[in-house]
Image: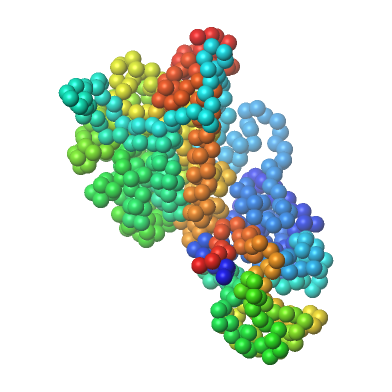
Amino acid sequence: MALSLLCSEFVVERDEQKCIACQVCVRQCTNDVHTYDPENDQVTSDNSPCIGCHRCVTLCPTQAITISRNPLYFKENANWTPLAIRNVFKQAETGGVLLSGMGNDRPYPVYWDHILLNASQVTNPSIDPLREPMELRTYIGRKPDRLQIDSGKEPRLATRLSPQLVLETPILFSAMSYGSISYNACLSLARTAQQVGTFYNTGEGGLHPTLYQYGQSTIAQVASGRFGVHPEYLDTVAAIEIKIGQGAKPGIGGHLPGEKVNEEISYTRMIPTGTDALSPAPHHDIYSIEDLRQLIYALKEAICYEKPVGVKIAAVHNVAPIASGIVRAGADFVSIDGFRGGTGAAPTVIRDNVGIPIELALAAVDARLREEGIRHKASILAAGGIRNSADVIKAIALGADAVYIGTAALVALGCHLCQKCYTGKCNWGIATQDPYLTKRLNPNIGTRRLANLLRAWSLELKEMLGGMGINAIESLRGNREQLRGIGLTDTELKILGIKAAGEAW
Amino acid sequence: MRRIYINEDYCIGCRLCEIYCLVQHSHSQKIIKAYKEELPRPLARVLVEEQGYLSFALQCRHCEDAPCIEACITGAIGRDSNTGAVLCDENRCVGCWMCIMICPFGVINMNTEGKKVASKCDLCYGEEEPVCVKNCPNEALVYEER
């Protein structure tokens, strides 16, 4: 075999004075970076297979290991960065499409970090959430055009309300399939959703029968491969989401390699063991908004109009008119996934170059639906790149009803964003089906950590709301006066629909 | 009594329990010193059994009808009245290994350095929680009353 021109990406440094040769690192690394030599009772490390996941660093009982970037110097070149050179080397060696996991990691502007929040001073009182009630409850679903009330002896609501999802905090777990993530990861998400009073999403992985008990906290996806879709699946869950696109790979289908399709996944997805699970890029029965409407209503018929049916799309250039069409087609909620949304596997070139940021897409969709007078007909769920509670509150002020978190949830479970999900060798037991690795994620710990994350974010949301003098998240929705842009161009401010920092009401 | 229970579904085979057990039963109780300077190396009283992807950490079960107590010829092995733990008084142990012969779990080891004594789990006598439980990174070991 010819010599590879790729030099190692990371350097594994081992402090020999601290290393006790206990071999925890040797046993934990699935990439065989560390090796034990019994002859001289020493552990040595090979830099080249290291992916920088920090499993060894975290478990080393003496903190003897540290991982750093290989400082190897390439001749300075603003055009030909080390990454560009390495990618050419890789493709010249393999002739293949470069793959990546997780979301777009390129240094595009992060608009969240260019948006500032307001707070009350003198003229309007702020609220202390520890002393006064603060409402985070959120309803997802179609709202009526107007309310009619029968004012008889006992007045009652005459309008028939559409089915709604009730969230105790405006944060849901994004679609991540059983297959792309492990059973223990799915179980952690499901249990947390039930415990906290929110929802998780099955992705296109179907629903394992042992997770039916969490059905009322589950949003079921119906995607282009229709994996795992059967009457019981639709009956068990709380809502249905038709997946058209994904932020990490707009316009691209999915591919779960056959090696990951073990017996349990084969049963859940209803495909033979060991066969590749291929989700086509388009739905082969949807080529127009009218076709989409047919599927929405076919599903609504199947569930007797008792649950909300939504549609998920990737944030692309024409997102606002598409979202308008989706609402008019009868969707009860629209999920918009920005280009920083994660994935188990996507061609790197697609992940890094296709789609637009969620901040702009969300503002554009909300503005368009308002202009057309149909904003109330569907809820908007924003996804793709929500990193903390400030991002959540900014998204809601930009017009989202609630947000989906995927990457943040996985990070809470231990993910270190090494972006190697597609290898199936996740050292943290998340993006793998290898029974030796999946047990590394104890769902009891996972549930506790996810619930803690949602609790912490919810407390912070209440603090920020209180500071603005608002006592219910409902009152912040689309309230862009609470936002100001910093370091943005006039066009960006216009699209975001916000004023520049320094401009008064 | 509170006992150590194993959940093999979540044992990741890292063997940190063995490492911390060894340190706890060393002279210095300092991890680097215990490994690098205390020679011969102290013994861990817990052992991770592995086959394929299945693994679990096994230490003395502190049986209700402990056969090692019956078998001990000097009365060195007895039950602690406070914790219920089965302990070996190393001053009385003569290293006859009858306990090792009779232990159904194979969790008693020979310590042949210096005076021969039987080495077994003492539930980290004096500690709030055994160190193997405290340091299990995946909560595969729990110390509780059932």
Q: Left or right: where does residue A25 sit relative to residue A460?
A: right
Is residue B123 shown above or below B71? above
Q: Quadrant of residue B94?
A: bottom right
Q: B127 or A323, which lies in front?
A: B127
Which quarter shows the N terminus of chain A?
bottom right
Is residue B7 shown above or below A84? below
Is residue A244 shown above or below B146? above
**Image location of residue A5, percent across then percent down:** 64, 46
Is residue A59 shown above or below A472? below
Q: Do we see residue A362 in this rendering?
A: no
Q: Do we see residue A25 in this rendering?
A: yes
**Image location of residue A411, percent across then percent down:** 54, 43
Which residue shows up at 34% across the image and 32% down it?
Answer: A140
Q: A223 or B54, which lies in front?
A: B54
**Image location of residue A184, percent across then percent down:** 46, 54
Give the residue at the far left of this rendering.
A152
Q: Quadrant of residue A80?
A: top right
**Image location of residue B118, percent across then percent down:** 70, 81
Which residue shows up at 77% across the image and 61% down it?
Answer: B30
